[in-house]
Image (cartoon, rainbow, N blue to C red):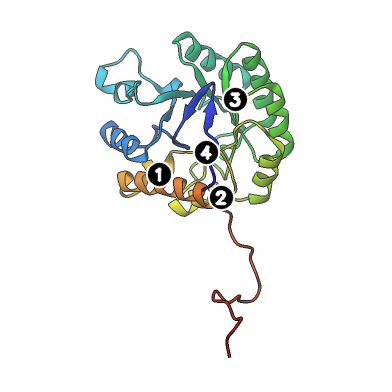
């Protein structure tokens, strides 16, 4: 059986290739159960929305076990470089190792602003931040971000929360061929089949939130996402048969009379 290479982010090896989020859950206990069921080892949280000075039951960090999960603070809500840097530096000041950088263009599309994303990445990498950067599925921008020294490039499969899966498989394939750093598809996963198809492209991992949190049964969906992520990776490593227009007999025809 083909030996898989490990997923390494910021010097740490992860067995799970699924990263899950913390938003849109009906309650923190459901979120905790979903994290457990997903098998994820990294959890992303919007730092700007954490109530650090409120009651303990309102602080989401109290429902994420730091011994089980690597915390990935993100800059959700940042629409310019200045806001992204402010949130990023707050995370670093609190001793958080990783950062998911996202600088969005507007609230309607929730698409990344490529220019602002590049500028913020450049500054944060120079400051020594371990940056996993959310970007569009443009292979050129992905390569430019890798050249800055980011820890991972995270192209959008489709718009955040849209549930459309990967819309441009060809661009993801080109990104995979061009980059040496980990490539993690971020956003747009709506069902287990979306994850399986994404992983079959050969990406190193997937980050998703809404597809689990907003499902009718979030805990069961978390389980399906875990299994799909694993199955998709195995399918990619195994190597699919070529697509053919006509059938091909599965039993040998030689020797038959």
Q: Which residue is mark 4?
A: 205
Question: In what element is the residue under mark 4?
Answer: strand
The one nearer the camera, 71 or 236, is 236
Examine the rendered structure and indicate whether residue 180 appears above or below residue 50: below
Residue drawn where x is 57% and y is 44% of the image: 157
Estimate how packed mark 2 is, as few (under 14), some (14 to 19) or many (20 or more) residues with alpha carbons within 10 Å.
some
Q: Are marks 1 and 2 in contact (CB under 8 Å)?
A: no
Estimate how packed mark 4 is, as few (under 14), some (14 to 19) or many (20 or more) residues with alpha carbons within 10 Å.
many
Q: Which residue is mark 2?
A: 236
N-terminal label among 2 and 3: 3
N-terminal label among 1 and 4: 4
N-terminal label among 3 and 4: 3
Question: In what element is the residue under mark 2?
Answer: helix
Residue drawn where x is 56% and y is 43% of the image: 159
Would residue 163 be seen by someone viewing this image from the given angle?
no
Examine the rendered structure and indicate whether residue 94 appears above or below residue 76: above
Q: Which disc number belongs to residue 226?
A: 1
């Amino acid at each position: 059986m083909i030996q898989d290479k490990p997923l390494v982010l910021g010097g740490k090896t992860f067995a799970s290739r699924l990263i899950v989020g913390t938003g849109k859950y009906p309650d923190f206990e459901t979120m905790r159960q979903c994290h457990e069921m997903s098998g994820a080892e990294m959890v992303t949280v919007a730092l700007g929305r954490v109530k650090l000075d409120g009651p303990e039951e309102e602080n989401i960090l109290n429902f994420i076990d730091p011994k089980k999960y690597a915390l990935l603070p993100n800059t959700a809500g940042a629409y310019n470089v200045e806001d992204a840097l402010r949130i990023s530096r707050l995370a670093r000041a609190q001793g958080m190792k990783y950062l998911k950088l996202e600088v969005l263009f507007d609230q309607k599309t929730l698409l990344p602003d490529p220019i602002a994303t590049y500028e913020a990445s450049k500054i944060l990498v120079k400051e020594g931040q371990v940056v996993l950067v959310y970007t569009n599925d443009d292979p050129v921008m992905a390569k430019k971000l890798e050249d800055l020294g980011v820890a991972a490039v995270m192209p959008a499969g489709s718009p955040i929360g849209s549930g459309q899966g990967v819309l441009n498989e060809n661009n993801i394939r080109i990104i995979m061929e061009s980059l040496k750093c980990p490539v993690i598809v971020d956003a747009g996963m709506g069902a287990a089949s979306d994850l399986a198809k994404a992983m079959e492209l050969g990406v190193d991992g997937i980050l998703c939130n809404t597809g689990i949190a907003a499902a009718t049964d979030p805990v069961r969906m978390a389980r399906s996402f875990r299994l799909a992520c694993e199955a998709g990776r195995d399918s990619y490593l195994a190597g699919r048969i070529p697509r053919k227009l006509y059938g091909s007999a599965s039993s040998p025809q030689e020797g038959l009379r």
